[in-house]
Image: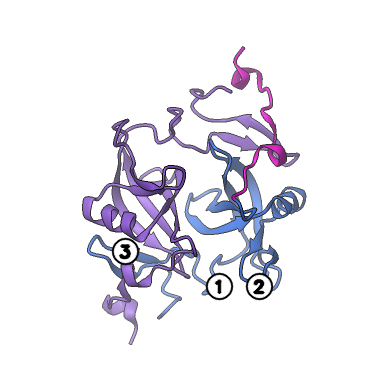
Chain colours: A blue, B purple
Amino acid sequence: MCSEATGNTLGNVMDLVKPDEQGLIVAVVQHYQTGQVLMVGFMTKESLEATLKEKKACFWSRSRRQLWRKGETSGHVLDVKGIRVDCDADALLIECDPAGPTCHTNETSCFYKRVDFDGTVTLSGDGVAAE
Amino acid sequence: MCSEATGNTLGNVMDLVKPDEQGLIVAVVQHYQTGQVLMVGFMTKESLEATLKEKKACFWSRSRRQLWRKGETSGHVLDVKGIRVDCDADALLIECDPAGPTCHTNETSCFYKRVDFDGTVTLSGDGVAAE
């Protein structure tokens, strides 16, 4: 029986995800309409649970060692429209509708620097960030 | 002077990237035309160097502890069309033209499982993978 055709569940994500030895799961944030990759963060099981419950992206801040509800201070929350998990269940794709710029620099995406094949890095974003 | 307008370089990516304490940099692979996120892997400085030189994605296999030239055995190489690095230089976005399915299951993308807000995981890919 084909589980896809019948819509059978594979289980609950909280049982399926495989955090690394530090309890972290890579979480890629993608704009749900444009497909632009906005940022990469880390989730723990606890932050994934908060994300599912609140439908707003909640990460684990490795530097501050605490839950990080994205947009808590800036207001630039990420409304979650869809979530995917990868084949080996150690990465998440979070499809979001961002309430503002995702990057702390006010660039739309954190990936505002282009790398040429000779290794040269140049700015290539909204033009907000300057270094 | 605006470095973006003049195209001034910010430096070389090999000097700028900040691998974690294990020497790893998260690398998100995105289809350069459709925008579909295909997989997430890890690069080391050495694998990034190989990627730049060969213009094909080369990762670090954490399980095998060696360079992993994607497609080496399957033929499903990822031709690299563009590379971006994020604001804090610990994540890479690799824009690719994939020569075949990216996932080892033969799904186009490794993210072929959908997560509902109640945590339920269901298949949602090309219908190749069945569990």
Residue A76 visible somewhere in the drawing: yes
At horizontal 28% and vertical 78% (from top left) the residue drawn is B8
Quadrant assignment for the C terminus of chain B:
top right
| N-term-proximal mark, 3 vs 2 | 2
In-front residue for pair A112/A63: A63
Above or below, comparing residue B104 to residue A4 in the picture? below
Q: What is the chain identity of the residue bearing mark 1?
A: A
Tag 2 secondary structure: loop
Q: Residues within 10 Å of mark 2 (few under 14, many from 20)?
A: few
Query: Which residue bears the numbered disc 1?
Result: A104
Amino acid type of the residue tagged 3 in the rendering: Val
Q: What is the chain identity of the residue bearing mark 3?
A: A
| N-term-proximal mark, 2 vs 1 | 2
Amino acid type of the residue tagged 2 in the rendering: Ser
Query: Which residue bears the numbered disc 2?
Result: A74
Residue A47 quadrant: bottom right
Which numbered tag is attached to residue B69?
none
* Left or right: residue A76 compared with residue A108: right
| N-term-proximal mark, 3 vs 1 | 1
- Marks 3 and 1 sit apart, C-alpha to C-alpha, by 20 Å
Which numbered tag is attached to residue A115?
3
Assess whether residue B7 is covered by the magenta stretch: no
The residues colored magenta run A1-20
Above or below, comparing residue A62 to residue A51 in the picture? below
- Marks 3 and 2 sit apart, C-alpha to C-alpha, by 29 Å
Quadrant assignment for the N terminus of chain B:
bottom left
